Image: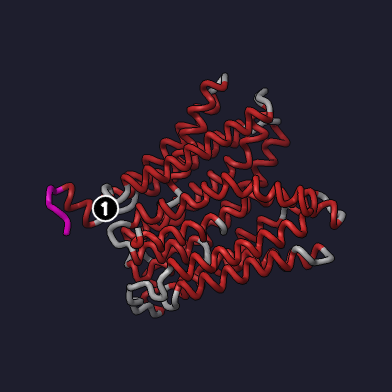
Amino acid sequence: MRQWLPAISAMACLGFGVGLLGIYGFFVEPLSREFGVGAATINIGPVALLLVPALVAPAVGRLADRVSIRRIALAGISCAMLSLCFISVVPSLWLAALGFLGFALGLTLYGPVVINGLLVKIYPGREARALALAAMGISVASMFLPSLVGALMAAFGWRDALLYLALGLWLTLWLLVLAGIPATTGVAPAQAGGRAESSLYRRPAFWLIGLCVAMALNVSLLVGICYPPHFVQSGYTVAEAGLFLSMGGLGGLAGKAGIAWLGDAGRAYARWIAAALLLVEAGGICLLLVAGSSAAVFPAVCMIGFAAGGFIPMHPYLNSRYFDAANIGHVNGAQAPLFLPFGLVGAPLAGYAYDTLGNYELVFMCMAVALLLAAGLVLALPPTRRETRSAAGVSAP
């Protein structure tokens, strides 16, 4: 059990980092009322969660290959939680926006680029299990954080609720990081001068993995945005829509568990596993489009959730198959800007399509096509040495 303590600490970092995005909606209406602006203005906030990582993740990734990840994570936790404390007391919206930028920066320092890089380094040969276990933190957090935040807001109001939440998470994460994340990664940094960095960008695997993952993860983001109005517009009640979302979340947890069980055994076929998940998600979307009853919707959302959840750990896992573990943070961070174009145009275009057509059917069709393209990109990756040897019937070392 002790050997998996770093992965458990990583689970907490992702759950109480990326997982916090699931409670953003609780604060939209109170902030809108407090500062006298529309909900559309408050909804601009999550753009910072795309812009900041895209701008700083390459530098953070390189830093994570050279500096103690424990120190980086502790600094990020402090930055993020102090920023939330700052937001809880500010008198104006522009100060709240400044605090949110600080939160986004802190989140980047203890987010996937840093944490996933750590797991690849300290669990050689068991990367899939460790990455999937850490990713489960996002699902676990989504199960109980909304109820906790709702109860805090009902009892204390949004300002005190945000303050108590931030202080509690600050203490919890510091303790878990100090207990579970080693002071050193156990992998000596590789020499990474300008020549090594330029050669990284010349490798097809860098672009194929980055673009594939950018498309797939942004489709998952769009699915979450489109689900509620799609179900309501299709004639289902809000309660039924919530049940569908819950089933999708349960499917996501099952997908991560599946990767934890299968990924290391099938590590020689990582690109095929990734492609299979993308095709299952595309199939789930197609099934959702033709579903005429809740009996058909349930398997569709479970398929989508299973595949999307299972794909979350695939970004660092695929990189670990094609790049040196000592530079994995650099690689993960350098690919982050590729996520930005899809993230910035996807949601506005989906909203425009809904306003124009009155439904999200065309958007779902485009998402299915994007997943097929992403599957084609990952299958275009060259076979790894392990895959080549396995195909030839030779045992890999």
Reply above or below: 239 against 348: above
| Quadrant showing the C terminus | bottom left
Boundaries of the magenta span: 392-397
Judged left or right of residue 145, residue 317 is: left
Judged left or right of residue 269, residue 204 is: right
Task: Report the residue at 76% width, 48% height from top.
Answer: 154
Q: Is residue 395 magenta?
A: yes
SS at badge 1? loop
Task: Report the residue at 77% width, 55% height from top.
Answer: 158
Tag 1 residue: 383
Reply above or below: 262 against 119: above
Task: Report the residue at 29% width, 62% height from top.
Answer: 124
Residue 279 rendering spot, x and y as whole percentages: 41, 37
Q: Nearer the viewer, residue 338 or 235?
A: 235
Quadrant for residue 107, please give it. bottom right
Reply above or below: 191 against 30: below
Quadrant for residue 254, please give it. top left
Which amino acid does the dot numbered 1 rest on?
Answer: Pro
Report how many numbered discs are placed on residues in the image: 1
Residue 352 rendering spot, x and y as whole percentages: 70, 41
Task: Report the residue at 31% width, 45% height from top.
Answer: 262
| Quadrant showing the N terminus | bottom left
Q: Is residue 353 magenta?
A: no
Mark 1 packing: few (<14 Cα in 10 Å), some, or many (20+)? some
